[in-house]
Image (tube, rainbow, N blue to C red):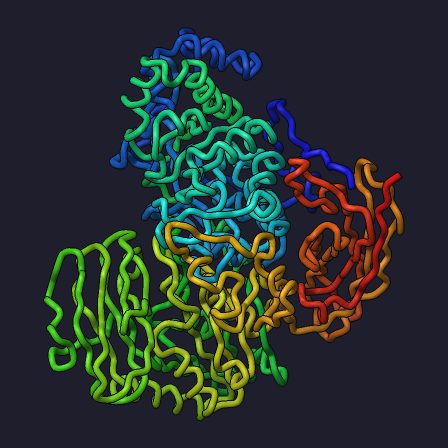
């Protein structure tokens, strides 16, 4: 076996444009969107005066390094401290560095934006969730997605977009799964690089987050979230997207995480920042802390943390004192400032700082069209028995649309800092009615109460009675069920990001924060008449009440839904998980409220029942065998109903494929024990190592509910003519090593898109999972049409991380090549291989 070059370089890299990144990834060039109109009236942020002769570093004819050196030489210690310390949370942007007008240094506004401009700013485009983008398996579409985000951030006056979120979806309970892409490092890297390229093509800096092992919300920003993870898993699973985003797509900066990794807090983790970003990769950009994630002064500065956000706690006066006391050298501080200034000059921020306003309306029809296109392309058809879908547009007859998520309370987006306030929103019911032709009648039945319409639990059932209002809603009492059946229990928590737990008999059944736009969360539970249960509520923020719906209160709505389904040709039940959010992990994979019971009742009444899921992560499906079709639309953003109707009526062929594995239940996930998720005794054990996601299911011969990469279409496809060249290569050969091609044919009657996926099996000596994604290509084909897809495997694709070598190594032996349309072996019909030899 021979080591593989890491490809790192100490040279500073010019920011590649879309064409450069397309060349890196082998992509088609994306559409370049028109930028929004000029700055709207409002409070434009302080900017540099480009013509000021007292600031010679404004001359763009000078090399960036020289400009940085000239400016740094004129900076006082106070100026330097200003550049690395957040100005406080009262600023117009979530993170903010104050301007230095005397030196022509503009202010730096940094705004949340993994799925669009966040933090409550209006006049923006609510994009589909990041997992929806990953489900498209389309980097060119990810580039267009990034262009929308970058353009709108710039239009709002922000200099830095805080995104994308490229953390691996290690466990489907993670509350932020929806704002991350996938469980797979290869897909993660490809989508991340394209997204960053799109953002930065609009002259907006991208800050990729959160470095690097941040996979849960439970115990976040505490030492109890201490991920014990191998160096091999770090490099093979959790770091590839950061490398692609920074060293291939040229991201300006990185945000370090809330988590602790192997005993060191992320924002002072020397392995991640000094050993990896700085020395091994030669990353020239800067590192910013997540909100309040800085935990020290000297160790953080020594590790390479360049900005503390949002305000001075360990930097500011504390850092100044450390420099004056020589605990932090001036050379270290200069390096911190140099990295920030370098990126500002690289993006022409001194000469052309953002002129937008936070009050500007930056959404455009072109941006909204991209949002719709991503929602359509990311929709995954999971089941379609008997050709139930697509619905005949002009002769569908009666269609019953059922569920609160269809109209009364749609779930367009997840919560937390990634939540985007939509300019408009099309509900599933509105979209279906608008798309239905003259031969189709649409009837709506809500089926279940909304979470906000539940009644307060009476004193006759709850002892002691829950107070009408309280601070810090901590409650412990007993609940006595008046009847047997399914109840919906809920709480209201208006506190922003204040995690709160609802427990029944000592088991947490609901764990979510109060985040816009929903403050009430529910869970369905089965209770027995006359039995007394211990009920407790703990968390933060002011709470209005504990509420519920009894089986008797639920029955009328479900009966009306059943009646609507019986009288319809097709029943479309729209369900959602509106509990997914930053600051808390999901307690289970069940749909909230009594949505499972609603689906089963409707399916029993109508064999042509279609279930549409709006969620950012996998859910369990106890009703799967009862329904005809299942459509996973994720969190589709503001075009929710428009995109859904286009798929249901066949205007768009569903072409999304799962970027995450759907397990049968919690017992099947790769981290099934408390010690592995969310951790015990102050440690989270990443025992699965590199066997994350589908790698785990393959390695343990587990059959999930739906495998990674899976997705149906309204047509069918066949794979043929696999060609692997050459059959034997010499270990140590540089450049592209193996080329793989295959033929994809549309064998159906309608046009559609397929995602051809290449998986590689390493020799046993490498100790790798059975198969790993190493290539994918999306092709659109008409009926009977064929296309040849091509893949190239280089040394890094064949390598694994070897701790003894402290680097990447290619093993000798037989490599297996698999081509098909999902990670499941049964869906990989083409198989071949090649041999790597030494000597």
The N terminus: image quadrant? top right
In percent of width and height, residue 86 lies at 32, 30
The foreground one among 725 and 369 is 725
Name the spot of residue 626 as percent of width and height, x first.
Answer: 52, 86
Of residues 74 and 281, the one nearer the viewer is 281
Q: Say which of 600 and 413 sits in front.
A: 600
Image quarter where the C terminus lies is top right
Residue 671 left/right relative to 467: right
Residue 567 lies in quadrant = bottom left
Classify 104 as above or below 515. above
Residue 538 in the image, given as x and y percentages of width and height: 23, 61
Q: In the picture provided, is 362 more to the left or to the right than 751?
A: left
Asked if residue 614 shows in the view, the reply is yes
Q: Nearer the viewer, residue 665 or 29?
A: 665
Q: Is residue 422 visible?
A: no
Residue for point 32% across, 67% down:
508
> Where is residue 738 shown, x and y percent of the image?
82, 47
| Residue ID at (60%, 52%) | 690
Residue displayed at 53% across by 43% down: 147
């Amino acid at each position: 076996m021979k080591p593989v070059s890491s490809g790192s370089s100490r040279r500073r890299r010019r920011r590649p444009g879309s064409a450069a990144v397309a060349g890196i990834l082998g992509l088609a060039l994306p559409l370049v969107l028109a930028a929004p109109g000029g700055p709207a009236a409002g409070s434009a942020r302080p900017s540099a005066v480009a013509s000021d002769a007292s600031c010679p570093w404004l001359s763009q004819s000078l090399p960036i390094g020289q400009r940085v050196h000239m400016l740094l030489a004129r900076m006082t210690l106070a100026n330097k401290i200003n550049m690395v310390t957040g100005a406080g949370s009262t600023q117009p942007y979530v993170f903010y560095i104050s301007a230095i007008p005397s030196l022509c240094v503009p202010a730096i506004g940094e705004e949340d934006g993994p799925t669009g401009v966040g933090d409550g700013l209006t006049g923006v485009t609510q994009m589909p969730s990041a997992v929806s983008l990953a489900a498209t398996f389309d980097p060119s579409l990810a580039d267009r997605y990034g262009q929308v985000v970058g353009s709108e951030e710039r239009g709002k006056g922000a200099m830095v977009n805080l995104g994308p979120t490229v953390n691996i979806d290690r466990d489907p309970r993670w509350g932020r799964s929806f704002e991350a892409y996938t469980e797979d490092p290869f897909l993660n890297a490809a989508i991340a690089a394209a997204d960053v390229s799109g953002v930065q093509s609009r002259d907006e800096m991208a800050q990729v987050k959160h470095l690097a092992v941040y996979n849960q919300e439970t115990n976040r920003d505490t030492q109890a979230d201490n991920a014990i993870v191998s160096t091999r898993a770090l490099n093979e699973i959790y770091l590839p997207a950061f490398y692609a985003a920074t060293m291939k797509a040229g991201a300006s900066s990185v945000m370090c995480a809330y988590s602790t990794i192997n005993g060191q807090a992320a924002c002072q983790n020397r392995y991640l920042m000094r050993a990896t970003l700085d020395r091994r990769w030669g990353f020239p950009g800067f590192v910013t802390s997540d909100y309040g994630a800085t935990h020290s002064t000297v160790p953080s500065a020594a590790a390479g943390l360049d900005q503390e956000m949002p305000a001075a706690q360990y930097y500011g006066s504390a850092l100044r004192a450390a420099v004056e006391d020589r605990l932090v050298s001036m050379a270290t501080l200069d390096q911190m400032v140099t990295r920030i200034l370098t990126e500002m000059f690289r993006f022409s921020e001194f000469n052309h700082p953002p002129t937008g306003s936070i009050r500007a309306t930056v959404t455009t029809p072109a941006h909204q069209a991209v949002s719709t296109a991503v929602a359509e392309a990311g929709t995954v058809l999971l089941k379609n028995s008997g050709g139930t879908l697509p619905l005949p547009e002009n002769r569908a007859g009666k269609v019953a649309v059922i569920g609160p998520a269809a109209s009364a309370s749609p779930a367009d987006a997840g919560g937390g800092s990634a939540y985007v306030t939509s300019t408009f929103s099309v509900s599933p019911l509105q979209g279906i009615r608008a798309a239905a032709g003259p031969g189709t009648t649409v009837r709506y039945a809500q089926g279940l109460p909304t979470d906000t319409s539940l009644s307060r639990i009476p004193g006759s059932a709850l002892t002691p009675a829950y107070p009408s209002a309280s601070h810090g809603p901590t409650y412990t009492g007993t609940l006595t069920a008046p009847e047997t059946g399914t109840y919906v229990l809920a709480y209201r928590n208006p506190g922003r990001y204040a995690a709160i737990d609802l427990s029944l008999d000592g088991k947490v059944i609901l764990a979510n924060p109060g985040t816009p736009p929903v403050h009430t969360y529910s869970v369905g539970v089965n209770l027995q008449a006359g039995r007394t249960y211990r009920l407790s509520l703990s968390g933060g923020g002011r709470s209005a009440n504990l509420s519920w719906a009894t089986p008797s209160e639920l029955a009328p709505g479900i009966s009306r839904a059943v009646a609507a389904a019986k009288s319809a040709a097709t029943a479309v039940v729209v369900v959602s998980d509106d509990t997914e959010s930053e600051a808390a992990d999901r307690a289970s994979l069940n749909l909230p409220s009594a949505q499972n019971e609603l689906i089963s009742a409707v399916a029993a009444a109508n064999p042509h029942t279609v279930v549409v899921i709006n969620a950012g992560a996998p859910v369990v499906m106890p009703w799967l065998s009862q329904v005809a079709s299942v459509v996973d639309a994720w969190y589709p953003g503001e075009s929710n109903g428009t995109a859904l109707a286009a798929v249901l009526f066949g205007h768009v062929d569903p072409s999304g494929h799962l970027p995450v594995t759907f397990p049968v239940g919690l017992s099947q996930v790769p981290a099934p024990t408390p010690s592995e998720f969310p951790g015990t005794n102050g440690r989270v054990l990443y025992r699965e190592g590199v066997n994350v996601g589908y790698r785990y299911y393959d390695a343990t011969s587990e059959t999930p509910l739906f495998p990674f990469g899976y997705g149906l279409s309204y047509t069918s496809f066949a794979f043929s003519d696999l060609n692997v060249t050459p059959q034997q290569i010499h270990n140590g050969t540089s450049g592209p090593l193996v080329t793989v091609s295959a033929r994809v044919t549309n064998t159906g009657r309608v046009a559609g898109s397929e995602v051809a996926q290449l998986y590689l099996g390493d020799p046993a000596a490498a100790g790798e999972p059975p198969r790993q994604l190493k290539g994918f290509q999306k092709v659109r084909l008409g009926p009977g049409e064929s296309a040849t897809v091509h893949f190239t495997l280089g040394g890094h694709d064949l390598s694994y991380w070897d701790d003894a070598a402290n680097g990447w190594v290619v093993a000798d032996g037989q490599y297996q090549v698999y081509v098909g349309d999902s990670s499941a072996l049964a869906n990989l019909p083409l198989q071949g291989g090649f041999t790597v030899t030494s000597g």
